[in-house]
Image: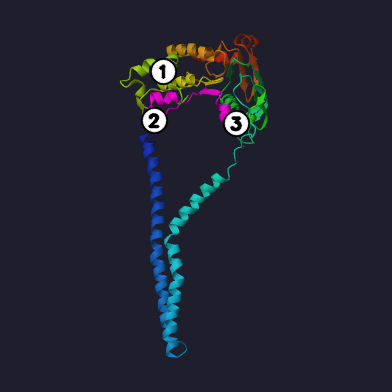
Amino acid sequence: MYSNHDLVKVFNGEKKSIEQFTKYNDTLYQSTWKAQFLSGLMQPIMGFVGNVGYVIVCIMGGFYASRGVITVGNIQSFIQYMRRFMQPITQLANVSNMLQSMIAACERVFEFLEEEEEVPDTKNPHSVEDIKGNVTFENVKFGYNEEKQVIKDFTAQIEQGKKIAIVGPTGAGKTTLVKLLMRYYDIQSGEIKIDGINIKDFKRDDLRSLFAMVLQDTWAFNGTIMENIRYGNLEATDEEVIEASKVAQAHHFISTFSEGYQTVLNEDSTNISQGQKQLLTIARAFLVNPKILILDEATSSVDTRTEMQIQKAMDRLMKGRTSFVIAHRLSTIRDADLILVINEGDIVEQGTHEELLAKKGFYEKLYNSQFEECG
């Protein structure tokens, strides 16, 4: 509610939000009150039990001492024994609330420790220095859980330097595919190869150094604009950062700030627009100079004019590099060398834009539906 305060205001959700907050707050109040009350009772109860024990020892000891069964020294010994016995029990009762917190924390810790370990990197990794960018998917199957397969039987051959567009309805597995390529997840069966080498035969760090990725959800951290762009290549000079910004069409808006590239982005990057943030992430990708480029709706937050400029810049960036472009607006991928149409985790069609339209199949329906919606 707090982080989406504007959304609550726009939809007049204040009353419902307050009611929901009051409900949660009352539940918290009752739970906290009971916990504090019971914790506060432990010490006086244990003190009372201990004192009752002393009284019983004194009464029974006096009774037996008067009959000559035991001596006063025996009574003193019993009192000392009882104090020694009650002391650790009292201490344990005093920390009972801490023990309950510890048990709750242990549940979370052991839940984390019981998670399946990541498959370790190979001991004899291949070098990535001479990688060109040929990518092969062979009968790839993957699911985030065993019950539901996201990628069912995916096979594709992508040549070096080609621009590959991946299209399909929401949930078809487009973004999952590139996550598998970068080995964020390991596939259940099949193989993914780069230049004929299984990606499992590379170290994860080396494999991911081949890629640059621009996502639909932009990301920037608290720091200067210069630092945010340089994150793509920490060894880049200021001149290289500025050049990447110019190519990504970000230099103009950066120059309008009084501090230019030294402008500090706040914690949530709210002092720049969503479109400007996306331009920064595109500039970051330019700075990487990757072998393989992945664009996941990279221009979704910019205006049409800027999108055309970025598209020209990206054409230069993609030249000679294997590029995967995930697109919902099919008009932006007409010039792709190969379009993979994915539906329900498998390739249903593939070809160029003109070839797929001529087939009058799934792609044509998908393409025409966008213009029907516009009309």
Q: Would residue 212 be visible to someone looking at this image?
A: yes
Residue placed under numbered mark 3 in the picture: 203
* Secondary element at tag 2: loop
Residue corresponding to mark 2: 222
Q: Position of residue 232 (x, y in %)?
A: 47, 24
Q: Estimate the spatial distance between the alpha carbons at disc 3 and disc 1, rounded to whole Å.
A: 31 Å
Residue type at mark 3: give it: Lys
Q: Position of residue 116 (x, y in %)?
A: 60, 41
Real-space Cα distance between discs 1 and 2? 22 Å
- Is residue 332 toward the left or the right of residue 24 in the image? right
How far, Cα to Cα, is label 2 from label 3?
Answer: 30 Å
Query: Camera-side residue: 211 or 34?
Result: 211
Q: Is residue 84 above or below residue 355?
A: below
Q: Amino acid at mark 1?
A: Glu
Query: Which secondary structure lies at badge 3?
Result: loop
Identity, as a three-letter code, of the amino acid under mark 2:
Asn
Q: Say above or below: 77 vs 306.
A: below
Residue 60 visible in rendering: no
Residue at 66% over, 20% down:
156
Name which residue lies at 59% across and 32% down.
185
Q: Which residues are magenta?
A: 203-230
User: Is label 1 in a helix, a strand or a loop?
Assistant: helix
In the displayed structure, 55 sits above or below 127; it is: below
Which of labels 1 and 2 is toward the front? 1
- The reply, left or right, for residue 112 in relation to residue 230 is right
Residue 109 position in % (x across, y down): 52, 47
